[in-house]
Image: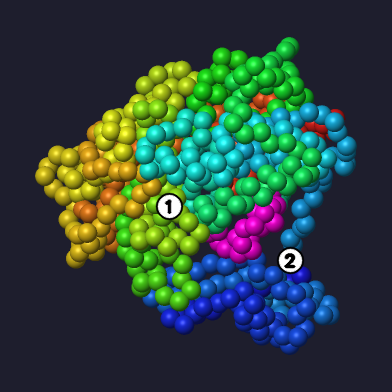
Amino acid sequence: MIRIGQIKLEINENTTYEDKSLKEILQKKAAKKLKVSASDIVRLDIVKHSIDARKKPELFDVYVVEVSLKGNEGKLVSRLKDRNITLSDRKEYDFWIAAGVPEISSDKKVVIIGSGPAGLFCGYELARHGFKPLILERGSDVDKRTEIVSQFWKDGKLNPATNVQFGEGGAGTFSDGKLNTMVKDKDGRGERALDIFVKAGAPERIKYESKPHIGTDILRRVVKNIRNEIISSGGQVMFDSQVTDIVIDDGRVKAVKCGETEYPCDYLVLAIGHSARDTFAMLKDRGISMQPKPFAVGFRVEHPQSLINESQYGKRAIGALPPAPYKLTTTTSEGRGVYSFCMCPGGYVVNASSEEDMLAVNGMSYSGRDGDNANSAIIITVDPKDFGGSDILSGVEFQRRLEKKAYELAGGKIPVEYYGDFKKAIDGDGQESGSIDNFIDQNFVPQMKGEYEFAKVHTILPDDLNKAFVEGMENFGRTIRGYNDDRALVSGVESRTSSPVRIVRLEDGVSENISGLFPCGEGAGYAGGIMSAAMDGIRIAQLVARKAGGID
């Protein structure tokens, strides 16, 4: 196939593409670049799409496509001498080649703890390639879980076993459903993950969008379809089954326990989430090699989506333009990293708590991203010296202290504060940021899942982190006009950005000190989002197959 880059289509008020008409337009553009007839193109695949807003308000859709032609493709590419026209080097993913082992049949017992992206994708690959994995999930299946979470947002009565953090699909189920990642994909695991998502019901466009997302509504259907495929391929998935202990004999994992029930295993995949604090404590008691790791904490910040659209596009959303995302990062004068995280265009701030008398928030969008507000976490880096202790789990206790403050601040409701009031309290000089030409309307209100109450959000974090947050917000106001407007909304606390520990593993994926144990995904400290967790799950499936094939 031939890869063609930099196919540009101008965006205007009348721009609306459906898949069929878009491919017809791209086929004509590709034929023109190749100097052939459109009828000579026998196949066209969209490889990548992005929006070029460098000359806003002039905007362009930019596509990379791959085409198959009648005739000799190599000769045509050589003759054209165009750096944007090359022969494709994409390779089809093959599990056994990636695992580095010939196709095998194995009766080894594999247990996977957790049905977040890491656990589901690990289980999917193993089940599809001859294993019969058992997935144990502490929370409920996604349908029951959705009912429980929706009720929690109404009445505030927490179910510690099934909530925004725990249950089928993991914490990502109630999120924006972003599928982009910074992880390099030289082995094709990212493409494989996207293929699995599409097969399970995600839209085809996620395979080529530069910033793909599917939204919480589609993601809930997708995870159920992945689970059903695991079961139909010979695997098993058990919900409401919290692993309470691991049986280790002579340095090797032998079984796991759910209460009094014991499940023997040859290999155990620890695909626990970043909020599995009781499991972290159990692993520590069992002597499994772990270490504290840096993460980040902060707040959710809300702005009108129209403000973000105007900043990113130079105009309000028109035609086929989606609600605009953003990414912001800065380093403070004291050397703290401050950055946006899990930005949700047209989304909601959600009560994402998982422990009694503690409160954490997250962001969530539906597939249409059609809410009035944009929200993002603005978070500050912290490391073990900030945690206030030397214990392996000191990061967990640091999170808990912040979440307890957030809970007490508004009696279990999400505490919210105007940024102007937050800044005035932290600066201590009576100076607010000021409002910019009514850039944010006086009637701007929170868009949240779960009850909220205005409160002194500035009392949650330590003073040095508050100062870093304000400095970051002021810097971001120079990038996005109105970002530091007094009427921007700040809520908290955003404390579950990533795991506070790393469960140490070696190059073969196995625990540093327990044979047969494979730490995996975000909770183990090896991923930071849906895609990277899914990719790590696929990698661990390959390494389990490699072990089962007798290759160290």
Instruction: Quickly name the residue at label 1.
Output: 343
Label ID, residue 88? 2
| Residue 389 in view (yes/no) | yes
Would residue 434 be found to the left or right of residue 207 on screen? left
Residue 365 sits in quarter: bottom left
Position above or below: 311 against 362:
below
Disc 2 versus disc 1: nearer the observer: 1
Residue 494 seen: no
- Residue at 40 percent across and 19 percent down: it is 389
Look at 39% across and 43% down and name the residue there.
Answer: 153
Q: Amino acid at mark 2?
A: Ser
Distance, label 2 to label 1, CA atoms, is 33 Å
Q: What amino acid is labelled 1 in the image?
A: Met
**Position of the N terminus by quadrant:** bottom right
Q: Can residue 205 be found in the magenta stretch?
A: yes
Work out whether 11 lies above or below 421: below
Q: Earlier in the sequence, mark 2 or mark 1?
A: 2
Q: Residues within 10 Å of mark 2 (few under 14, many from 20)?
A: few
Residue 262: image location, x then y, percent: 70, 19
Measured as percent of width and height from the top left, residue 6 is found at 59, 73
Quadrant of residue 295 within the rendered picture: top left
Identify the colour scheme used.
rainbow
Residue 454 at x, y percent in the picture: 23, 43
Q: Which residues are magenta?
A: 189-212
205 to 272, vertically: above or below:
below
| Rendered location of residue 321, percent (x, y) | 46, 71
